[in-house]
Amino acid sequence: MALSTSLRSNLIKPLTALTALSSTHRLRSPFSSSADDATVLTIETSVPFIGHNCEPPSRNVETTPKELLGFFHDMALMRRMEIASDSLYKSKLIRGFCHLYDGQEAVAVGMEAAITRRDCIITAYRDHCIYLGRGGTLFECFSELMGRQSGCSKGKGGSMHFYKKENGFYGGHGIVGAQIPLGCGLAFAQKYSKDETVTFAMYGDGAANQGQLFEALNMAALWDLPAILVCENNHYGMGTAEWRAAKSPAYYKRGDYVPGLKVDGMDVLAVKQACRFAKEHALKNGPIILEMDTYRYHGHSMSDPGSTYRTRDEISGVRQERDPIERVRKLILSHELSNEAELKSIEKEIRGQVDDAIAQAKESPMPDPSELFTNVYVKGFGIEVAGADRKEVRGVLP
């Protein structure tokens, strides 16, 4: 069932005045050797932040030409990767569950701009772009999606279980909401170690009603853990609109005694500002909730056409008015940081990179069947199994 007209209009918010330039220099193309990447721009977020039990950060966000062009490149790369994944799934080169992130790229990119790789991120099953933002490669992504040895989880995790511990990414998780207590556990370890880092535990609006979220949040608040709970509110939990599943869909207020902040998750600069604010808060005062108001263009998963419970007009309206990549493109062009031809060239180069990564991933071999028994137990600790009479079907797993 589609959203009512009034609720639908809240999803498609027209772009307000996006920019407020604070610079004494006329910006030149960053592709020229004379480009001044140290030039500081001050840009106003698309809509104000809304705070709960906290004073919201300023709408004025500092950035540079280099950062804006980096945002454009990274989000365009993520978008192309997800579109290619859709094609690979339909060609049956990707099997099993697959959840795409196109439309939500500003959350992944803006968050990375505000933190370091020493900070931790843990998320649900819509994890491809989070992994890429944490320093993963296209080759590793496509290899894992196609179940190949060269994948980030050695081809054994698939779409929902990307992982890169060395870069502070503790995975995608297939059980709805189960990553949130794990994220609070990571924050506990960070506080115990006194290393001045934080954990971002990400979940969707569909998981926001999970009891384990509130149990974990209560403990995080009791112990002032540096945990930042990020609700990526794309307005549909599978095929159920938020207003049908939640009596109170103001997810940033759900923490009650825990502060919260509502953020335009389609504005990469707003996400960056909010995550920086949240990190500072968490290190001093304990947990905080960020609600990222975002939108997914694809269905929930590949079996969901995404158009039975919402109208095509709603989807196209969000694309036209709130698309995160187009917002950055307009900023770049309006401040003359680049031109349309150069941005098209970047997108063309990205298409080539994605195609090359897919071709390489297809050449990677499948895991050996013996891999079924590895990475299950700590090395040196196995388990002995036997039949009911202890005499048959006996073996020892490594």
Image (cartoon, helix red, strand yellow):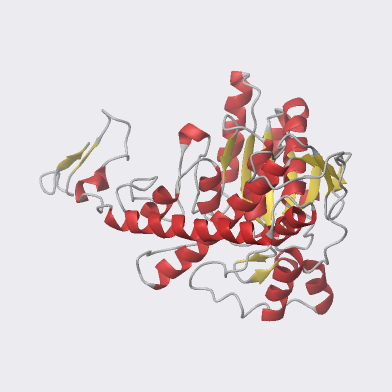
- Considering every residue shown, the one lying at the far left of the view is 391
Is the N terminus in the top left, top right, bottom left or bottom right quadrant? bottom right
Say whether residue 353 is left or right of residue 49.
Answer: left
Is the C terminus in the top left, top right, bottom left or bottom right quadrant? top left
Q: In the rendered image of this protein, does residue 193 appear above or below residue 253?
A: above
Residue 104, given in percent of the width and then of the height, sits at: 64, 57
Q: In the rendered image of this protein, does residue 344 appear above or below residue 118?
A: below
Camera-side residue: 13 or 395? Answer: 13
Residue for point 71% across, 80% down: 313
Q: Quadrant of residue 208?
A: bottom right
Residue 12, given in percent of the width and then of the height, sits at: 78, 69
Residue 307, given in percent of the width and then of the height, sits at: 61, 79
Residue for point 49% across, 44% down: 171
Instruction: Give the total of numbered labels.
Output: 0
Residue 101 shows in this picture: no
Residue for point 88% across, 58% down: 17
